[in-house]
Image (cartoon, helix red, strand yellow):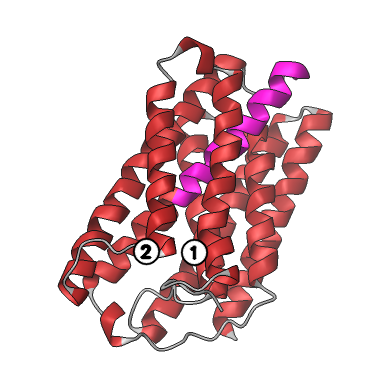
Amino acid sequence: MTNLHLLQAATVCYTLSVLAYLTQLMLHKSWLQRAALLLVSSGFLLQSSCLAWRWHLAGFLPVTNLFSTLFFFSWALAACYLYFELRYRIGASGLFVMFLNLLLLSVALRRDAAIPPLVAALDTPFFSLHIAFSFLGYALFAMAFSLGGLYLIQRFMPNRHLPDLSLLRKLNEEAIFLGFALFTLCLVIGAVWAYWAWGYYFSWNIKGIWSFLVWLFYAGMCHAKFIRRWQGTGYALLSIAGFGVVLFTYLGIGLLLDSNHPLE
């Protein structure tokens, strides 16, 4: 119960941060922006404490079922948001990111929080590295999705209290590049782990195929930023479409199809 109380407290902080960002957009008070950042930081620290507690109880990185993957996805997204906020001061843009974060947590809190035992094939250092790089990559793609949506809003309904289009474009491209780099590490470590455990680097299972398609899509996006017709609005639309591919690879396959990465 202790770790669930921590998670519930983190959810309250994230909810209040969304309300603070929303109010800041309407009232344009700088103290609301600072309060929202403090709430996000507090929520992240509480969620990190919850993650550390569960890791200590399990003896391994507890990302083995739907609750724990949604939880870790949310944690990684909050970490990515704080990186961009502290580096670029994106302010009320956090409304969109933290709302997505709340959606992840709201689904997670309805699931069983028990930590299943780790099967023998997963009990290696490769497991933690593969999972960590995977969900950090997913979180950055989610960040790019939020920034892409924000770019389109700012493009067609400008708001002087949101970042300008040039900054949003830069942030979107950076999120895509960092996410692609981390997801590449995820695939490389996954391939080494598969060879160590089963004697082959790649198998034609549906999860492996769609993970490669995600990698291929974002590799194309890293190239598309240099092509004029894909810059700006086109890139924002690709960011939104790409996250749809990510969600299908993560949730669609795990919940709807038979794969070696089931979610329960």
Q: Reply yes or no: does residue 139 show up in magenta.
A: yes
Residue 61 percent coordinates (x, y): 37, 73
> Can you tell which mark lies on residue 3?
none
Task: Name the side, left or right, on which 207 lies relative to 231.
Answer: left
Point 60% across, 69% down: residue? 256
- In the image, residue 223 sits, relative to residue 75, either above or below, namely above
SS type, badge 2: helix
Residue 88 percent coordinates (x, y): 49, 28
| Part of the protein shown in magenta | 138-159
Residue picked out by circle 1: 72
Point 70% across, 17% down: residue? 155
The mark tally for this picture is 2
Is there any visible trace of residue 212 in the rendered image? yes
Q: Reply yes or no: does residue 165 show up in magenta.
A: no
- In the image, residue 163 sits, relative to residue 197, either above or below, namely above
The N terminus - image quarter: bottom right
Dot 2 amino acid type: Ile
Residue 60 percent coordinates (x, y): 33, 78
- In the image, residue 171 sits, relative to residue 155, either above or below, namely below
Dot 1 amino acid type: Phe
> Can you tell which mark lies on residue 131?
2
Q: Residues within 10 Å of mark 2 (few under 14, many from 20)?
A: many
- Pick the front one: 111 or 198: 198
Is there any visible trace of residue 168 in the rendered image? no
